[in-house]
Image (cartoon, rainbow, N blue to C red):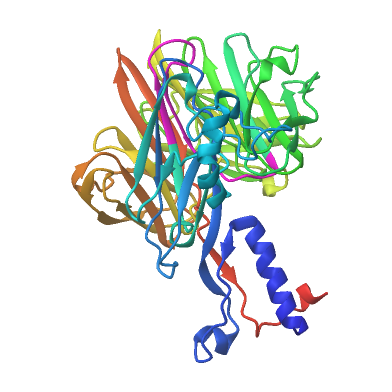
Amino acid sequence: MNRTTLSLIAGATALAAVTGFAAVAAPDPGSAEQRTGAAATLPVERTGLLCPQPSTSDLAETTYTSFAPVTEGADDKGTAVLRAAAQQSAPEDGESEDGEDGENGSADEKDESDEKEEEGEKDAAKDDKAGKPVLQLQEPGKPVTAEADGADAPALVGTADGRFASGWTVQQTTEVTAGTGRGLRGVACSAADTQFWFPGASTDDSRTDYIHLTNPDDSAAVVDIELYGKDGELETTVGEGITVKPRSAEPVLLSTLTAEKQTDVTVHVVVRSGRVGAAVQALDDETGGDWLPASADPSGRLVLPGIPKDATAVRLVAFTPGDADVDLKVRLASPSGLITPAGNETLHVKGGMTAAFDLGDLTRGEAGSLVLTAPDGSVPVVAAVRVLRGEGGKQESAFIPAARPVETRATALDNTAEGTTLSVTAPEGDAEIKVTASAGTKGGTPQTKTYSIKSGTTQDIEAPVPAGLKGSYALTVETRTGGPVYASRTLASTEGGVPFFTVQPLPDDRGMVAVPDASENLSVLQR
């Protein structure tokens, strides 16, 4: 094998490690890629997603939804399967290698005869270590759902390959009608990684915040958790060297890591070995709760998309790693353009310290997204906002972290004909997007619309709904021209006079990967 071919494989392997696996096939000799040496863009062939344990409340009602858009050029075969992973550890001596019982139970709950009866089936599917699928896709373009009630709903570990891998998206939505953190909680299941930032967490007595760590692999992961408050890093007792067992989920209560009680904390998760999925579940005694997803990577320019137009309070939490202070320029991308909020033109963030700012009813009845900019982009920042809706004792909270742009395509799940709001912003230039409503989980015909988003604006668009909709459906956003584009989706309902809601930013699904042609000059890789 010549050096060029070896370098191509090395480059494709590096890409696959980050984005999934893409088919690497030699282009047709007469193709444009072959003649010009341009990279081919191909669908990823394998990907994985992790969902945290939804709730510890007996009143919780959870819906898992899985979906893969139809992708041109994808394989005509494949699978997309989610299995339970909650508290699932590596086998102990004398146990069967396949330790889960097929639903939410563990090997300890099975008797020896049951294990023998299932041994043959498990040997035929070696990857079925967490038991029978909780949720499995049947065809691209049509979402499927599964339901789980109470505190036994598990964390999930999933993989997709072939025709399902490109753009595979999973959402879990939980409603809790009473108790700490009551409300609507939603989170888009995420890929495993080695570092996460969560500005907006808390160790205050009024909050019960957990960092959920999920390990998809067959070896243990070792994780460090760092906490940063208003005066810098908090002293922690057991935040270093936390072991997450193979194929398991581990919730860690933040208030047990430190004796310091602080309203606003930034959580930094660093994985020493292995990889994990991570999300913060933030539960408040008075104002409900929701999931806090990880912020986009530290950057000198951040966009927090889709603050609800009827928000009654917005609290921004920002953090900059390192020692450098920064004065953040704050702008609101409104339906009419970028504006500077009166009294909050710039916000000072000290290096290594968490800063919080109350922005009030920032949106004033209009769609809006926050745009934060450091001078010359020189100081990287992470940020999130906590949003309240409602008044008095009937308030509900949700979180919106700084988001990645929709570079090509992104999907939001569990939408219904009523109570769904799709918010799109183009802070730097005009953009055109295509939005597709999938078939419903129980019936309906897909619909597509195209929208123009003016530079510097945020639009709550009237998204399409499948004709003859039955069940819930997926909304897929594709960038056609211009941009960059950022998007979020809000689900809302009213229970007992309380405005339940949850907001999920829509990051790019990373379903396509550029694979360089073998004829390209890969001298950089050859070195």
Q: Residue 61's quadrant in the figure?
A: top left
Instruction: Work out which quarter of the rendered image holds the N terminus and state it.
Output: bottom right
Residue at 30%, 51% in the rendered image: 438
- The residue nearer to you, when weighing 259 against 44, is 44
Residue at 63%, 34% in the rendered image: 248
Residue 231 screen position, x and y as percent: 77, 20
What segment carries the magenta color? Answer: 172-195
Residue 87 screen position, x and y as percent: 61, 28
- The residue nearer to you, when weighing 484 against 235, is 235
- The residue nearer to you, when weighing 396 against 23, is 23
Looking at this view, name the residue that lies furthest to the left.
468
Instruction: Work out which quarter of the rendered image holds the C terminus and state it.
Output: bottom right
Q: Residue 235's quadrant in the figure?
A: top right
Q: Is residue 174 magenta?
A: yes
Residue 199 screen position, x and y as percent: 63, 30
- The residue nearer to you, when weighing 47 against 310, is 47
Any part of residue 348 in sight = yes
What is the count of numbered marks? 0
- Left or right: 419, with 216 as reference point: left
Residue at 55%, 42% in the rendered image: 119
Any part of residue 155 in sight = no
Instruction: Say above or below: 210 vs 334.
Output: above
Q: Is residue 187 magenta?
A: yes
Instruction: Say above or below: 361 vs 191.
Output: above
